Structure formats: C-alpha cells, structure tokens
Amino acid sequence: MAHRFAGPADLHLHSNHSDGTQPPAEVMRQAHLHGVRTAALTDHDRTTGWAEAAQAAAANGMTFLPGMELSAKHEWRSVHVLGYLFDPGDAALQAETERIRGDRIGRAERIVRNIGRDYDLVWDDVVAQTTAGATVGRPHIADALVARGIVRDRTEAFAGILHPREGYYEPHYAPDPLTAVRLITDAGGVAVIAHPVTSGRDRMMPLAYIEQLIAAGLGGFEIDHRENTEQGKRLLRDIARAHDLIVTGSSDYHGEGKPNVPGENTTSEEMVARLIDRASGSSPQFA
Ligand code: AMP
Ligand code: FE
Ligand code: FE
Ligand code: ZN
C-alpha cells in the first residue's frame, strides 16, 4: 500500500505570518501547483498559519505537517532550527517565541532608524509592508525599500543595504541552538537544522557543537537546500549517516520574496515517515 504521504514532500515553506509574501492557503496552493504532495508550513517563530494551511492542504489533497523555523544564534552565527510536529501550546516554547518576536520588532525599528540616516525610509513604511501580527524581519524592511524605489527587489536589498557590512544591521535576541533543539524536542517535536552550511556569514557551527546538539536530541539536517554548499552537503551526509539522523530537502519558499520555487528540493518518503514516527507533540494531517 502506498504511504498516505506518497509523492514529493517539501518541508520548508513560509507565509505572510512571517516573511513570505502569500497567505498560508496560497502557499499550499502554490506547492500543489508545483507537484508537492506533502507540505509543511514553517514560518519564523510562529505557528498561527497552521490552521489555514492545514485546511488548504486538505482542499488540495495534500498531506500537511505543522512546523516552524525557530531563530537561534551560535556566537555571531544566525542558526535556524526547523521544528516539526511539536505541541504549539507548549508553554516554554511559546514564551521563547514571544520573546524573539518581541525583540525582532525593536530590532527592526533600530535598523530602520540606521537606514533613515542615509535614505528616505521611516518605520511606517515597514508597517505598511507587514501583515498585522507577522514575525517581522529584514525582508519586510526590504519590501519597504522597494516601495520607496530605493532598491529593485529583496535580493538587491540583501546584497546591499541590509547586508551587515553596510553598517545598518542590528542583531535580535535569539536562544542558542542547544536551547532551541531542547525546546522543540521537549515539546514533542523533531528538530532539524535548516540550511546548516551556507557560505558567508552563517558558516557552519563547529563540529563539536553539532555533536552536542545531536546528544541533546537533534533529529536531523536540512541538506538539500539551495544555499548549502556542495562540500558542506557531503560533510553533513557523512555526519547524518554516522549518527543515523534524518535528512531533508526543501525549497524554503517565500512567495515572491525569493526565487525559490516549491518542490525545487524534496524529502524522501522514508525520511517523512521517520519524522512522523519520532514526533509526539502534534499530528500530521494525511491526505
Ligand atoms: P532576519 O531574520 O530578519 O535577519 O532576516 C533573515 C531572513 O531574510 C531569512 O529568513 C531569509 O528568508 C531572508 N533573506 C535572507 N537573504 C535573502 C535574500 N537574498 N533575498 C530575500 N530574502 C532573504
Ligand atoms: Fe525567511
Ligand atoms: Fe532560514
Ligand atoms: Zn526559511
């Protein structure tokens, strides 16, 4: 018998509940149009899109996995930890995501103030680009810069004004990855490090620290992601094999905000099954 989650799985998609440009239902529709049959909604630091996404997934005959991309930080590195099938009502996890989201607002205001010294940009421009209640990030500032005619698109904004080297950047509060992995795992979820080996400023965490994450219950790595380096993917596959970890592939779709297309990378049925078997915090919704 075919699995109830047969077909291409894309386990990393963003809606306008964070920095994607489309509502959760449209994200699921786009995933379906691109041939995805199992999808996870993984907005940054929030779970409010789950209900709409689950409903749209069902309407499109897709299996749905609830997820989130939790912001973390190791020294100067921004680390993103994907959480799947955790309990969205878990008090510790909720408290932490509230703290992150709250600090993201003040931090975005500081970045806008910095930019405003040199460009015609004010906080209201960013508010106008952000869905009420969404997790605020630099992509919303990028959209405000586009609306002001200062840059052409998000890509140009990130390559220039929003890049830390330009001097406008400010950090936001985030827990360390060990805390992030524990929070997700303790909430019954499975923690997977998102795009662990991008080039540039988010260079990979030291191997000894990754070993600590594994000891703390890390479920796996997102290996097939357009921003991981080829050399890094080989290294991660070796680590995953040695520790019998889950490996995933996904698009990191952000609607019109990025060139990433749903289904451009996918996760095998075997790995989806392992994710589901390992989790206890919430249930997948099968097609
Ligand atoms: P922040 O968490 O506010 O620092 O912003 C980081 C977010 O910006 C990530 O989640 C990415 O989705 C997005 N991002 C990073 N680089 C780019 C880019 N070149 N184009 C569009 N979005 C980007
Ligand atoms: Fe994002
Ligand atoms: Fe990410
Ligand atoms: Zn993402």
Image (cartoon, grey):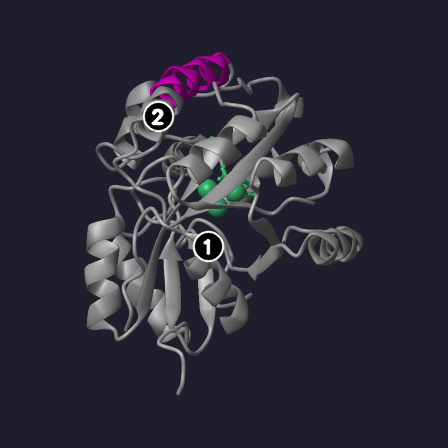
Q: Which mark is residue 204?
A: none
Residue 213: x and y in percent read: 62, 36
Q: Is residue 110 magenta?
A: yes
Q: Tag 2: residue type? A: Ala
Disc 1, SS: helix
* For residue 151, above or below residue 38: above
Query: Is 166 above or below relative to 147?
Result: above
Q: Is mark 2 within 8 Å of ligand 1?
A: no
Residue 64 coordinates in the image, percent (x, y): 32, 62
Front-lying residue, 117 or 259? 259
> Could one spot residue 261 in this view of the protein?
no
Label 1: which residue?
A: 278
**Other-residue count near label 2 (Cα within 10 Å), few / some / many at <14 / 14–19 / ≥20:** few
Residue ID at (27%, 53%):
24
Residue bearing the label numbered 2: 92
Circle nearer the viewer, 1 or 2: 1
Q: Which residues are magenta?
A: 101-117
In the rendered structure, the answer to whether residue 195 lies left or right of residue 39 reads: right
How many neighbours does mark 1 have within 10 angstroms: few (below 14), some (14-19), or many (20 or more)? some
Q: In the image, is residue 246 above or below residue 73?
A: below
Instruction: Give the x, y percent position of residue 102.
Output: 34, 19
Task: Kindly identify the amino acid type of the residue bearing the numbered disc 1.
Answer: Arg
